[in-house]
Amino acid sequence: MTSLLLYQRIAQQLAEDIRRGVYQPGERVPSVRKMSSQLNVSHATVLQAYANLEDQGLIRARPQSGYYVHQTPALTAATPDIARVERPGLVTRASIIQQVLVEARREGVFAFGAAVPHIDYLPLRALHQQLAKVTRFQSPRAFNYMFSPGFEPLRRQVAIRMRDAGVVIDPSEVVITHGCVDALQMSLRVLTSPGDLIAAESPTYYGLLQLADLLGLKVIEIPSDPNTGISLEALQLAANQWSIKALVMSSRLSNPLGSTMPEERQKHLLRLASDFDIQIIEDDIYGELMYEQNKTKALKAFDRLGHVIYCSSFSKTLSPGVRIGWMIAGKYQAEIQRLQTFSTHSACSVTQMAVASYLENGGYDRHLRFIRQEHRKNLSAFQLAVQQMFPEGTQISRPAGGFILWISLPGRVNTQELHVRALEQGISIAPGLIFSNTEQFNHCIRLNCGLPWNREAERALMTVGMLAKQLCQDAGQSW
């Protein structure tokens, strides 16, 4: 414990020196040997400190040369404003969403639009190995039906992983689903009937709005803060006016804002849910990508009265294509299993078995540490580039994890038009229009930063920034 505290103190002191300008960007910091001698500590302790600073993106190692400051200018752009409360409404954005999703898969298009991690951040080789092993040695079972609640060894691994989110459950309480959207869809089906009203964060995940439309539900959008999440005050006001059957939200790394709800606000939300008899569907698909683990628990961790149905998947960490999600439905589990048995049965047998085998082998935590570090580094680079390349007055979110940014452009910039112009240049973005059933976010975009920060990404972002500036100028001329 003493050694751990020592390397953290060394890292903290050097980080402060970098931020004060003692060491400038591009300058070499003291060598491991020199720092070891100055502080009278071991080389291993200094290397630990430097590794910590690398994880923060403050320094970079150069082969045969040493460590150099990689710190870029401070992020000073404001965070986006909170939304207004609007009356419940139906959804009209399907065609634009479909276009964004199609563009993300089109060859030659730089995909800032869909929130899909780059192939470099997926453990494809390990998954290939597990799939080969399963199909070779367990083929009769792997190619047969697998019914709800899913493959028991996989449910056991999920139950183990849920401890990291503060949720202590038995494997029998886990239901494996065909991705997170499947879990959300089944949750809504057991909690609501056509014509019912549900609440959602605003802005919210566009897939939820489309699900609500398909199920004949109305949506009341609750304003959300980019840092602390859904407004509990606005939710209470809405609950006083309307009968809300369910609330769909994320307590950790919401999409698209990236907000994370503090523990006290999570507990307050559960008290509100109890007072107004509102069931909560927690979408925690980005939860495992929190940069600082064990700091923030899932909302389900504080649920003592069974108000929360928890939903998640491996789409953002392992692979979108494996289509493996899960849910913890509590008192609704029997109904969920009945619904699943007579609709999708369960997720694909082969992929369930392969993912279970991968998790059992222990490589997943190493993979998570790697992608968290990469996403943190890339997200910081994207934030600073947006600040430098986009119009003055642009507001930028500051998520504590994940790989998506919410950007609010100044003035009357129409980001649907920006979407069209960017696509003409071979770049896909997600316009703010699709994240709400209102017109509040027509000046916003969501950026996928789950991509390596390189010259190609920089050029693409520079192009989007230039187009945004042109639209700002055009909008200014019409005032």
Image (cartoon, rainbow, N blue to C red):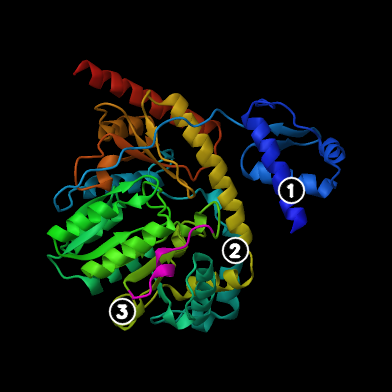
**Cα–Cα span, label 1 and label 2:** 26 Å
What secondary structure is the stretch in magenta mostly built from? Answer: loop
Q: Is residue 325 above or below residue 445?
A: below
Q: Please report whichever mark, 1 or 2, sits nearer to the chain's N-terminal start.
A: 1
What's the residue at 19%, 40% (across, down)?
A: 439
Quarter of the image with the C terminus is top left
CA separation in Å, label 2 and label 3: 30 Å
Residues at badges 1 and 3 in contact (C-beta under 8 Å)? no
Please give left or right for residue 238 compared with residue 252 in the image. left
Residue 39: quadrant of the picture: top right
Residue 32 seen: yes
Disc 2 versus disc 3: nearer the observer: 3
Mark 1: which secondary structure?
Answer: helix
Q: Nearer the viewer, mark 1 or mark 3?
A: 1
Q: Of residues 189 and 251, which is closer to you in this image?
A: 251
Instruction: Tell me the number on the disc at residue 364.
Output: 2
Residue at numbered disc 3:
332
Residue 474: image quadrant is: top left
Which segment is the magenta one? 295-306
Q: Is residue 181 among the parts visible in the rendering?
A: no
Label at residue 365: none
According to the picture, the residue beneath numbered tag 1 turns out to be 7
* Residue at (26, 45) in percent of width and height: 434
- Which type of secondary structure does the marked residue at label 3 adopt? helix
Q: Amino acid at mark 2?
A: Tyr
State the residue lying farthest toward the top.
477
Residues under labels 1 and 3: Cα distance?
Answer: 48 Å
